[in-house]
Image: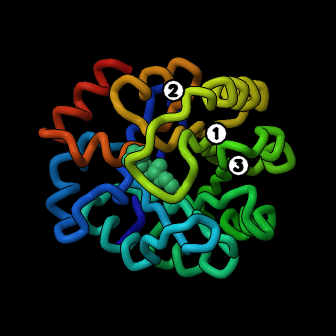
Amino acid sequence: MKTPRFPLPSGKAALVPSVLAADFTCLKSSLAPVKKLADWVQVDVMDGHFVPNISFGPGIVSSVAAASSLPVDAHLMVSEPGLFIDAFAAAGAGLITVHSEARLAGACLKKIKDLGLKAGLALRPGTPLKRVLPYLQNLDLILIMTVEPGFGGQAFMPEMLPKVKAARELINKSGRGIWLQADGGINAGTAEAAALYGADSLVIGSALFSAENPAAFLRGLRRRL
Ligand code: DX5
């Protein structure tokens, strides 16, 4: 199955369901109501070492890509992302994000680009923004974690908003089309705050999949942003 082209930043906020919060017994029906309203889907990959949780591997990327017909962003919360980039690329990820705190992050970003994919760099809440500077010219996405990575359903960390704002200023100054993604505790209220501070890609897990009507939730969010 051909991987759909990954969209470029357009000034409009991209809404990105995180399947970490979806019902794994029926991913296809979980994604059905939202796939026409979402811009792409995020698969949160956890290795039980970089974060104290284990989630899923490349197989879920293929399932999500097939179930949603949307581009898939693989957020690798793993200590050794270099071991897995080929597998996630082969599984159909259109964008792969590695953590700046992971081993050989720079070499991983280069490998992702060499494979013709979009490359993202993620920062834990405690990691300073300046960690992205050496890679800025090659990045397609900067992910600012607005919770400690590892679990969905956590509360948004408003103290990350100044970092979002500073990242927006950095991206604008670079003149490059780089997505600024906020991930963690995003709901209707915090989405508005994150967008106000400059995020243009919002990862939504629990707030979306626990909503009475996920499609209505996304439509409402689009109206607010
Ligand atoms: C944390 C995960 C979560 C997930 C979104 O490691 O990265 O942030 O994507 O989960 P919610 O929206 O439930 O916070």
Whichever of callouts 2 and 1 sits on the residue coming sooner in the sequence is 1
x, y percent for residue 112: 66, 66
Spatial CA distance of label 3 from label 2 is 20 Å
Residue 98 visible somewhere in the drawing:
yes
* Residue 189 placement, left or right of 88: left
Residue 40 visible somewhere in the drawing:
no
**What colour scheme was applied to this rendering of the protein?**
rainbow
Q: Label 2, secondary structure: give it.
A: helix
Query: From the viewer's perspective, is residue 28 above or below residue 91?
Result: above
Whichever of callouts 3 and 2 sits on the residue coming sooner in the sequence is 3
Q: Amino acid at mark 1?
A: Ile
Whichever of callouts 1 and 3 sits on the residue coming sooner in the sequence is 3
As drawn, the label of residue 10 is none
Whether residues under marks 1 and 3 lie with C-beta atoms below 8 angstroms apart, the answer is: yes
What residue do we see at 61% from left, 41% from top? 144
Spatial CA distance of label 2 from label 1 is 16 Å
Q: Dot 1 corresponds to which residue?
A: 178
Between disc 3 and disc 2, the foreground one is: 2
Q: Dot 3 corresponds to which residue?
A: 139
Whether residues under marks 3 and 2 lie with C-beta atoms below 8 angstroms apart, the answer is: no
Dot 3: few (<14), some (14–19), or many (≥20) neighbours within 10 Å? Answer: many
What residue do we see at 75% from left, 45% from top? 127
As drawn, the label of residue 194 is 2
What residue do we see at 75% from left, 59% from top? 101
Q: Amino acid at mark 2?
A: Ala
- Numbered-mark total: 3
Q: Quadrant of the N terminus?
A: bottom left
What residue do we see at 72% from left, 70% from top? 111
Q: Label 1, secondary structure: give it.
A: loop
Q: Amino acid at mark 3?
A: Leu
